[in-house]
Every structure is written in structure tokens, then in C-alpha cells.
Amino acid sequence: MPEFVLYNAPQSTCSQRVRYVLHAKGRAFEEHKLDLFKGDQLRPEYLAINPNGVVPTLLHRGAPVTDSAVIVEYLEDILGDVAPLRPKDPLKAAEMRAMMRFIDEVPTPAIRVPSYNLAFLPHYQSMTEAEFQALCDSKPLRREFLMKMGRTGFPKAEMDEALGRLQRGVDRMAAWLEANGGPWLTGRDLTLADVCIMPVIVRMDDINLGGMWNKAPAIGRWLDRIRVTDAFARTYYHGSLLTEKYPHLQLAGKRMEPAEA
Ligand SMILES: N[C@@H](CCC(=O)N[C@@H](CS)C(=O)NCC(=O)O)C(=O)O
């Protein structure tokens, strides 16, 4: 078995974090692409390595490591001397981790709401009520989330709340860039905090929500900068963006902007 095996999905934002770190550290890995709509993540053999039934899961020498934020820290623990992505200074490392917690509390869950409404909802709409309920019940982590979405999509109030959380994420990111002088969130060096916010910002840009950082051009510069890193191109292979699979989404964000709602 190869040293690293990654179970993930091309468009999964959590998976993109792990792919980025593995590429940044120049580590080859065997990639398994799960079909999340066919339920590959809920098969017993997968639940045996990730009882949450979500991607990503990294196998390191056969041992499973789960949760994207945990996996990227684990990779830093074992490969910290190659392309370091965590400050050596404990106080600065604490600052980075506090950013990661905020990212996982506020913008990361919020981006799921427009993503599901715009792209994933149609996958569930042909199901009967009973089939949909059975699907919700089969999800260890996302049962209530899916039930809230239902087969008609998240209501406007839920969507507006998610957009508000995304705006708070953007505002906080702008404040970090300003306070630390950029070009990266903690300052001079790219860290795991940048990697963790990356899929949210890329997804927002992809579904036309980039207008949310019109007043914070430092975020546009940050995005341009991360996009030209080698690891980025390898992480976002064709099919990793929502608009590559669902081209009709290109104008979707325009329709979601609160002012026009
Ligand atoms: N906190 C977890 C969340 C993982 C997660 O939500 N993964 C999503 C894709 S980004 C998933 O597998 N969804 C499948 C499902 O809900 O059934 C992590 O960061 O790894």
C-alpha cells in the first residue's frame, strides 16, 4: 500500500484543503474519488474508517486520519520540515489555529447552504419523501442539515443567514490581512489558515459571490496569489469547481446577492 491514500471528492471543499497540503509538501498519494450522490461515503467499508460518513479521510500507512482540519495539522506534524505551513513561534501558531477554528465555525458551514441550493438540490428532488427521509437518516453528520434543506431547498431566511455568515468570514479575513500586513493571513508566510479558507473563497468566486469582497481588494489579491501556487493547479484539477460540473451556476451568485433578493 502507498504511504498516503486519500479518500475524497473533487468538488468537496474539505477535500481540497488536504489535496493542497499534500501537493504543497510534494507527497504523492493514491487518490480515491468517492461519488457522494451514489452514497460511497456511507458504505460500511468506508464507515469503518470514517464513522462520520464524510470525506476526506487520509490513510497514512494504513491508519485513518479524519476531519480536514485535523488531517492538515497531522500532515504538518509528520512533514513539518518540508514546505512548512505552521509558524514555529507557539504564539503565532496559536493565532493560526484560532483563525482555523473561526473558519470552521463561521464561513465553512455557511458555504454549504448556497452550494446545496444551487448545485446539489436537484439530485434529491426526484426522490419520494420516504426515500429522502431514509437518506437523511443514513447521514451520521448531516442528517438535520439535509432535513432543513428538504426537497424544496433552504428557505430565503436560511440563505440570507448563510450569506451574512459568509460576509462576516470575508470581513474577518480582510481584518487579518490588514492587521498582519499580508500577503497571507498570518503575515509573510502561507499557513494552514490560508489553506483552510481557500476552498470557501474559491467557491464564492466560482458561484459569483466575489462581489462580497469588493470593499476589501486585499482578498482579491490574496486569491490571485494563491491561485498561482503550484499546489493550487494540482488541487483544482478539472471538475473541482462547481461551475465545471454545473455550468448554469456561472450567474447564480448574481441572483443571490441580498440587494437583489
Ligand atoms: N468537518 C469535516 C466535514 C467533512 C464534510 O462535511 N465533508 C463533505 C464534503 S465537503 C461530505 O463528505 N459530505 C457528504 C455527505 O454529506 O453525505 C471535515 O472538515 O473533514
Image (tube, helix red, strand yellow):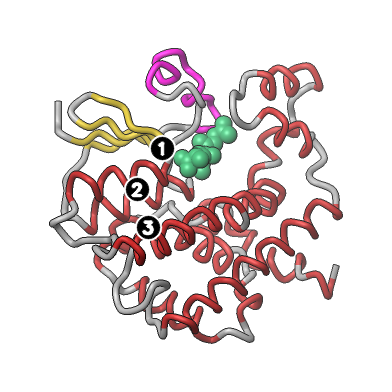
The segment highlighted magenta reads: 36-49
Mark 2 and mark 1: Cα distance apart in space = 8 Å
Left or right: residue 38 versus residue 3 is: right
- Provide the residue designation for mark 3: 236
* Amino acid type, callout 3: Tyr
Dot 3 alpha-carbon crowd within 10 angstroms: few under 14, some 14 to 19, many 20 or more: some
Query: In the image, what residue occupies the spot 83% across and 75% down?
Result: 259
Which label number is shown at residue 145?
none
Q: x, y (%) of residue 209?
A: 64, 69
Of tags 3 and 2, which is closer to the observer? 2
39 magenta-colored: yes
Of tags 1 and 3, which is closer to the observer? 1
- Provide the residue designation for mark 2: 18
Q: Earlier in the sequence, mark 2 or mark 1?
A: 2
Which label number is shown at residue 56?
1
Left or right: residue 15 versus residue 123 is: left
Mark 2 element type = helix
Badge 2 vs badge 1, beta-carbon distance below 8 Å:
yes
- Does mark 1 have its CB less than 8 Å from ligand 1? yes
- Residue sitting farthest toward the front: 91
Q: Earlier in the sequence, mark 1 or mark 3?
A: 1
* Amino acid type, callout 2: Val
